[in-house]
């Protein structure tokens, strides 16, 4: 396994991280625990979850799985998207974040979070309130580092400026949709993160499986795929993304790699990327993804990937989650 610093911090994370959105939903508890243990045994130390994943089952399963291995893990979770029906059941107010942190700690069976992330920008709460609450969490020892997710470049830069001016702990990382099928972060976010020393954590690195080659082989949606279990995901599948998936598959086969491997290796080589989080519902999927860590793309393959994905630098992001 290879490791990198998370942004400009001293924290080292595996270049491949484990995303756990499917745990407790598309992967049952026993399977999820086996995947976590296999990831740790393979050198992965970064595990990412959120308070809302699988109605909080993801956090509970992770807490059960870690047992005596908590110190081996850089554990990341999030809060800020809608958690319930009450007036304070979402957003990044002090009240909501403190409630959700305590609940996450309990489910994860730990007394600290390594990376606590705001799931999306909250236009209804002053950034000063959010950042002061996060700074208090760091000072208390319940949180080690803080990160953002689904922030536009200007929102993230504003937050960093406030933290610097007020002397608060600043965002170390940001999570954003980033892949060969979504290069929109390269317009503004990537240059900003390079300048400010913020690590990028891409989610949907395989565009929900489109870059794995599983879609478009037949007219039918594969059983067990995200598009099969989550019908709303079908909105991402269109002629352009399917064509990209086929082109990536052809290029990968030509050079003796899998579509997933070459797509992840490309993303790991991008500036400012610290760790790439990939989900798995089977150990075999995780094994396939682990191969990407050891793929060294030459300039010819990199250039080819850049060219076939160039149209995806523009337009709307593949995914961008905001408060309603």
Image (cartoon, rainbow, N blue to C red):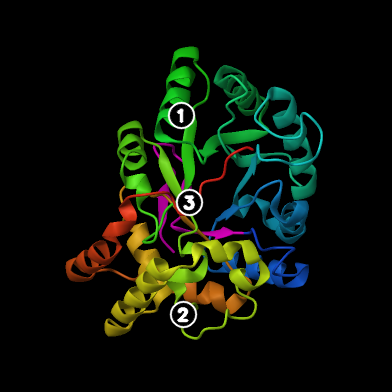
Q: What residue is rendered at 32% in x and 46% in y?
A: 186
Residue 230 in picture, x, y percent from top left: 65, 65
Residue 11 visible to an observer of this rendering:
no
Q: Nearer the viewer, mark 1 or mark 3?
A: 1
Q: Within 10 Å of the Cα at label 2, are there few (<14), some (14-19), or many (20+) other Cα atoms?
A: some
The vertical placement of 290 against 100, above or below, is: below
Coordinates of residue 271 in the picture (x, y in percent): 30, 48
The quadrant of the picture occupied by the N terminus is bottom left
Mark 1 and mark 2: span between their CA atoms? 37 Å
The single residue placed furthest to the bottom in the displayed view is 218
In this figure, which residue is indicated by the disc labeled 1? 155
| Residue 292 location, quadrant | bottom left
Task: Mark 1: give few (<14), some (14-19) or many (20+) Cα within 10 Å.
Answer: some
Up-down relation of residue 185 to residue 224 (above or below): above
Q: Which residue is mark 2?
A: 216
Magenta range is 1-19
The mark nearer the N terminus, 1 or 2, is 1
Which residue is identified by label 3? Answer: 13
Which residue is rendered at x = 72% and y = 36% of the image? 101
Element assignment for label 2: loop
Query: Are the residues flagged by discs 1 and 2 in contact, CB closer than 8 Å?
Result: no
Q: Quadrant of the C terminus?
A: top right
N-terminal-most mark, 1 or 3: 3
Badge 3 marks a residue whose secondary structure is strand
């Amino acid at each position: 396994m290879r490791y990198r610093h998370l942004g400009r911090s001293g924290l080292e994370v595996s270049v491949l991280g484990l995303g756990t959105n499917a745990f407790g939903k598309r992967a049952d508890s026993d399977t999820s625990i086996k995947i976590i243990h296999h990831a740790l045994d393979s050198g992965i130390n970064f595990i990412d979850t959120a308070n809302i994943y699988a109605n909080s089952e993801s956090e509970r399963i992770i807490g059960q799985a870690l047992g005596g291995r908590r110190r081996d893990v850089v554990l990341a979770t999030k809060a800020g998207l809608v958690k319930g029906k009450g007036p304070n059941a979402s957003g990044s107010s002090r009240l909501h974040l403190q409630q959700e942190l305590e609940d996450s700690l309990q489910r994860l069976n730990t007394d600290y979070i390594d990376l606590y992330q705001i799931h999306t920008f909250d236009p209804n709460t002053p950034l000063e309130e959010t950042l002061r609450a996060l700074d208090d969490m760091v000072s208390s020892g319940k949180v080690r580092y803080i990160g953002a997710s689904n922030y536009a470049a200007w929102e993230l830069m504003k937050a960093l400026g406030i933290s610097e001016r007020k002397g608060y702990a600043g965002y170390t990382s940001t999570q954003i949709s980033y892949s060969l099928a979504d290069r929109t972060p390269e317009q503004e976010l990537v240059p900003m993160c390079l300048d400010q020393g913020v690590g990028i954590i891409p989610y949907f690195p395989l565009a929900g499986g489109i870059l794995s080659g599983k879609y478009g082989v037949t007219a039918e949606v594969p059983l067990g795929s995200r598009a099969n279990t989550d019908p709303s995901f079908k909105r991402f599948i269109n002629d352009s993304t399917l064509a990209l998936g086929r082109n990536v598959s052809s290029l990968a086969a030509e050079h003796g790699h899998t579509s997933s491997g070459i797509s992840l290796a490309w993303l790991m080589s991008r500036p400012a990327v610290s760790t790439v989080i990939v989900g798995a519902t089977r150990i075999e999927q995780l094994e396939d993804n682990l191969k990407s860590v050891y793929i060294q793309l030459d300039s010819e393959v990199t250039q080819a990937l850049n060219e076939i994905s160039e149209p995806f630098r523009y337009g709307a992001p593949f995914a961008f989650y905001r408060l309603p």
